[in-house]
């Protein structure tokens, strides 16, 4: 793990050129390192932005705004200096190099947020929310991450833990006075109380599938025979002309992808080569192979059928082969005279015209419903992280086991052990008790400078 005693430095803004770039320095020597960069200036005043020339060996290389945040009132809980300089990569790297020559070391990915976690500025749920907020690509993703950063999920978990603590105290008290005949909780009451807490966890987990879709997104693959309008539909869903569209069958040979905001979810739409039984050359065969591979990993398949042409063997094969997977049948070219109807298939079909855009909005809503199980995703989900879901699911299972033990009048120490195990799992969610390897994995996924 990281050493929390060093003074660290890193560029906190994305790579590349910009109007401004921010360098963050944190640690016991942060103020002294910043003073080396501007030796002719008086000491920095806490929480005062100061305009100063930065340089090394009396040679200035930038004019920047420098702000000093003394511990513990800073992002990391340590002394922190933030330098807002011009956003040239050369200038920013020069400042970092000078800081490192003055005693700081380059920060590891996520080390600033890790220090904030160590110093109690945030718990593990909030730390993970920082990364999610940085990575958000849809407004709903950002809202969900910010809610967790504000502590909404932590507060709900702490309420559950408080109920378990009270229950655990009564069970332990009964164990401490067995000979005196004191019983601070009856088996029936214990079962009822444990089930009530398990129910609260179940409510939290009820939002998990939708929350993970918001956080992680999903992949939707478009499949169909050549010239059925797959690429035109792809362009309509993507909102731009990403895929080449012609009247020549087999135009698309490789996979074309685009990430779109669909009801708050970051959905990766994949356009594929036309599927048919007689590819004309090795390139087309490889395109079909890649389409099949994309189908295997996709969360949902859009099966595009041409409404203006009779269904053929390729269509029938595709419909049959995808019958057991998550899919939507899409009847494209509804602006042209239809040759067959949905009743012909005996299946639900989404009618669209990729040429005019008719029906595309309804298709987007149908995709969202198929992926999430709900019609609208505007409400912010309470839980979005797979790690949290796994731990809470385990905590609920342990509590149900404890409730069953209480119902069977099992010795109180076994019930108390299950309640204690559930509390341990909740503490691992918030980071009150988390293994080092878990912390290492979480913070290693951060960007440098955050």
Image: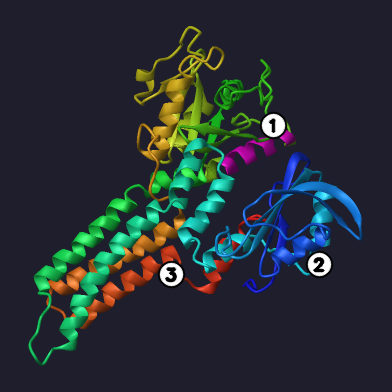
* Position above or below: 335 against 15: above
Is 290 magenta? The answer is yes
Q: Point out residue 174 in the picture as x, y percentages from the top left corner.
A: 15, 82
Q: Residues within 10 Å of mark 1 (few under 14, many from 20)?
A: some
Drawn side of residue 187 relative to residue 430, left or right = left
**Label 1, label 2: how far apart the Cα atoms are:** 55 Å
Which image quarter holds the N terminus? Answer: bottom right
Q: Residue at x 11, y 74 (%)?
A: 187
Of labels 1 and 2, earlier in sequence is 2
Q: Which residue is mark 2?
A: 102
Of labels 3 and 2, earlier in sequence is 2
Q: Residue 443 appears in which quarter of the rendering?
A: bottom right
Res 299 visible: no
**Magenta span: chief secondary structure:** helix
* Position above or below: 42 against 306: below
- Residues 372 and 121: in front is 121
Q: Pointers 3 and 2 in contact (CB under 8 A)? A: no
Q: Looking at the image, which residue sits at the far front? A: 42
Of labels 1 and 3, earlier in sequence is 1
Query: Considering the numbered disc 1 on the image, is that residue within a helix, a strand or a loop?
Result: loop
Q: Which residue is mark 3?
A: 432
Magenta stretch, residue numbers: 283-294
Q: Which residue is mark 1?
A: 253
Drawn side of residue 319 relative to residue 45, left or right = left
Q: Residue at x 18, y 85 (%)?
A: 175
* Position above or below: 296 against 347: below
Query: Considering the numbered disc 3 on the image, is that residue within a helix, a strand or a loop?
Result: loop
Q: Point out residue 414 in the picture as x, y percentages from the top left corner.
A: 23, 80
């Amino acid at each position: 793990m990281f050493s929390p005693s060093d003074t660290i430095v890193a560029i906190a803004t994305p790579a590349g050129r910009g109007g401004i770039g921010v360098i963050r320095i944190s640690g016991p020597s942060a103020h002294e390192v910043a003073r080396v960069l501007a030796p002719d200036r008086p000491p920095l005043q806490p929480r005062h932005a100061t305009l100063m020339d930065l340089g090394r060996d009396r040679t200035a290389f930038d004019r920047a705004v420098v702000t000093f945040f003394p511990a513990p009132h800073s992002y990391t809980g340590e002394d922190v200096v933030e330098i807002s300089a011009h956003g040239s990569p050369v200038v920013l790297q020069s400042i970092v190099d000078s800081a490192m020559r003055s005693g700081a070391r380059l920060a590891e990915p996520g080390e600033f947020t890790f220090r904030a976690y160590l110093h109690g500025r945030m718990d593990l749920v909030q730390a993970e929310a920082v990364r999610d907020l940085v990575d958000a690509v849809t407004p709903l993703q950002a809202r969900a991450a910010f809610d967790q950063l504000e502590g909404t999920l932590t507060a709900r978990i702490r309420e559950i833990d408080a109920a378990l603590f009270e229950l655990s105290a009564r069970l332990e008290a009964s164990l401490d006075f067995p000979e005196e005949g004191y019983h601070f909780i009856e088996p029936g009451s214990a079962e009822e109380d444990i089930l009530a807490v398990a129910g609260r966890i179940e409510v939290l987990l009820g939002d998990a599938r939708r929350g993970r879709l918001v956080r992680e997104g999903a992949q939707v693959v478009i499949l169909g025979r050549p010239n059925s309008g797959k690429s035109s539909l792809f362009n309509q869903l993507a909102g731009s002309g990403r895929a080449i569209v012609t009247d020549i069958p087999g135009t698309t040979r490789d996979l074309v992808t685009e990430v779109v905001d669909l009801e708050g979810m970051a959905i990766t739409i994949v356009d594929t080569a036309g599927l048919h039984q007689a590819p004309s050359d090795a390139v087309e065969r490889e395109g079909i192979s890649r389409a099949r591979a994309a189908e295997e990993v996709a969360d949902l398949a859009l099966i595009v059928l041409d409404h203006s042409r009779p269904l053929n063997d390729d269509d029938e094969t595709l419909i049959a082969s995808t019958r057991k997977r998550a899919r939507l049948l899409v009847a494209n070219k509804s602006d042209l005279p239809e040759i067959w109807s949905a009743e012909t298939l005996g299946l639900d079909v989404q009618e669209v015209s990729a040429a005019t855009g008719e029906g595309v909005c309804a298709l987007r809503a149908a995709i969202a419903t198929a992926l999430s199980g709900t019609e609208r995703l505007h409400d912010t989900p309470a839980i979005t992280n797979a790690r949290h879901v796994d731990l809470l699911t385990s905590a609920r299972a342990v509590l149900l086991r404890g409730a069953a033990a209480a119902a069977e009048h099992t010795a109180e120490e076994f019930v108390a052990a299950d309640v204690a195990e559930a509390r341990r799992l909740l503490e691992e969610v918030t980071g009150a008790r988390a293994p080092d390897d878990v912390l290492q994995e979480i913070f290693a996924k951060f960007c440098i400078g955050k």
